[in-house]
Image (cartoon, rainbow, N blue to C red):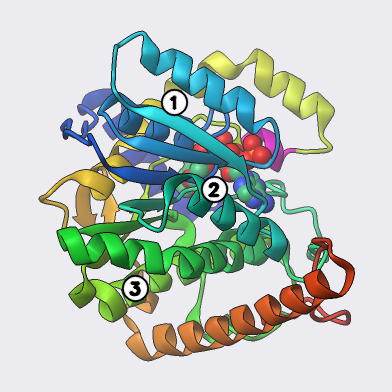
Amino acid sequence: MSLDAIPKMVVHMARRFFSKHPVATPVDLTGKKIIVTGAAVGSIGYLTAKTFASWGATVVVSTRSNTQTVVDALNSDISDIGSAGKVFGYPLDLSRVDSVTQFVSSYRKEHGEILDVLVNNAGIHLDLLSEWKQPKLTEDQYEIHWRTNYLGGFQLTQELIPFLKNSGKETGDARVVNVVSHLHTKGINSAFGEEKPEYNSWQAYGQSKLALVHHAFEIERKYGKQGVHAYAVHPGSVYSNIAHKGLDGHKLLQAVRNSLGFIEKRLLLTTEQGAQTQIYCAVDHQAQPGKYYQRCQVKDPSAETQDEQVAANLWKATTEWHKKVSKVADISKKSNGQHKGIKTNGESHCIF
Ligand SMILES: NC(=O)c1ccc[n+]([C@@H]2O[C@H](COP(=O)([O-])OP(=O)(O)OC[C@H]3O[C@@H](n4cnc5c(N)ncnc54)[C@H](OP(=O)(O)O)[C@@H]3O)[C@@H](O)[C@H]2O)c1
């Protein structure tokens, strides 16, 4: 931990032990359709989905595998409280173009072309010990945090925007909630579209989250008048599965962490506490669109997020990327009749 992180840590501890954590006020969600990505048991997404369903919404969740197990667990949790809400789920791997398209197609088949809220919650933060000297690349040769957290989230949102607009036309209040992180402050605008000479996984994670803040603000600018609003949310430091995955390959450390988990749990927020801000932004009428939220309150994001030109350029470049990969996916599907990972660029780990 660097020295400049100490004041933040002190504030976190003071809040954790001496202040009451904010709780989103229940809203009747009967008739609403909400997608929450990344809702594995033990994650912030799980608690988010459970809350929406317990307030009456139809909730569609995703995980990469064992999706039905998560759906069953959620439906069993909410059946106890007699809610009218219901949970559905489909597998989704944000790092694969075909998987995102398949998820959207499954949603359309079962729930139609209308969506009230999309919570882009799924995300990864790997290599917590900063050991990687080179980035880990996805099948299509992108840096893994960038590909999963940003490009995958962008593709999903883009393909669901028509459904959100349909809801926005009726209600004026369809929403996209991007779950980001205070670590977006590690991202810098000048690094978009460039390869860094030295790799650092925390910087890569921060860069992907900075892009997601720009994404949320740009959605608000582009679609706000059409009734589709967007928010960027930091959930707090939460005890979930994220750190376990971030320590992948360190069996001893993971075992120590598991056995001392009770200490970490005391220091960090629970997933229920961590879910409150994204729940608030997804459904509370007082939430202000186009803002960055923490602890159910508007907070200042980094100065980098205020550059609208960068956001517009990023949007344009990512839209072009999306068009290109969708076309390749389409050709590949037509030519051999099956979905495959799309290799767009075999030689580098560039951002686009
Ligand atoms: N926990 C924190 O302290 C903290 C702090 C700031 C921000 N956040 C953000 O909060 C969000 C939720 O994190 P969490 O703490 O709940 O983490 P988590 O417990 O690890 O849950 C992450 C979820 O994302 C899914 N996911 C991972 N890779 C994916 C991929 N390639 N495609 C689709 N889904 C994928 C996981 O699915 P599988 O089950 O298939 O792995 C899981 O359901 C993330 O965006 C994270 O960056 C967390």
Checking the image for residue 219, the label placed there is 3
For the residues bearing labels 3 and 1, Cβ distance under 8 angstroms? no
Chief SS of the magenta region: helix
Label 2 crowd bin: few (<14), some (14–19), many (20+), radius 10 Å? many
Q: Earlier in the sequence, mark 1 or mark 2?
A: 2
Checking the image for residue 122, the label placed there is 2
Q: Is residue 312 magenta?
A: no
* Apparent side of residue 191 relative to residue 225 in the rendered image (left or right): right
For the residues bearing labels 2 and 3, Cβ distance under 8 angstroms? no
SS for tag 3?
A: helix
Q: Amino acid at mark 1?
A: Leu
The answer to whether 64 is drawn above or below residue 41 in the figure is: below
* Highlighted range, magenta: 243-247
Residue at image coords 21%, 28%: 19
Question: How far from the left and from the top, in percent, is residue 274?
Answer: 38, 35
Which one is nearer the viewer's eye here, 227 or 150? 227
Q: Quadrant of the C terminus?
A: bottom right
Label 3 crowd bin: few (<14), some (14–19), many (20+), radius 10 Å? many
* Apparent side of residue 274 relative to residue 244 in the rendered image (left or right): left
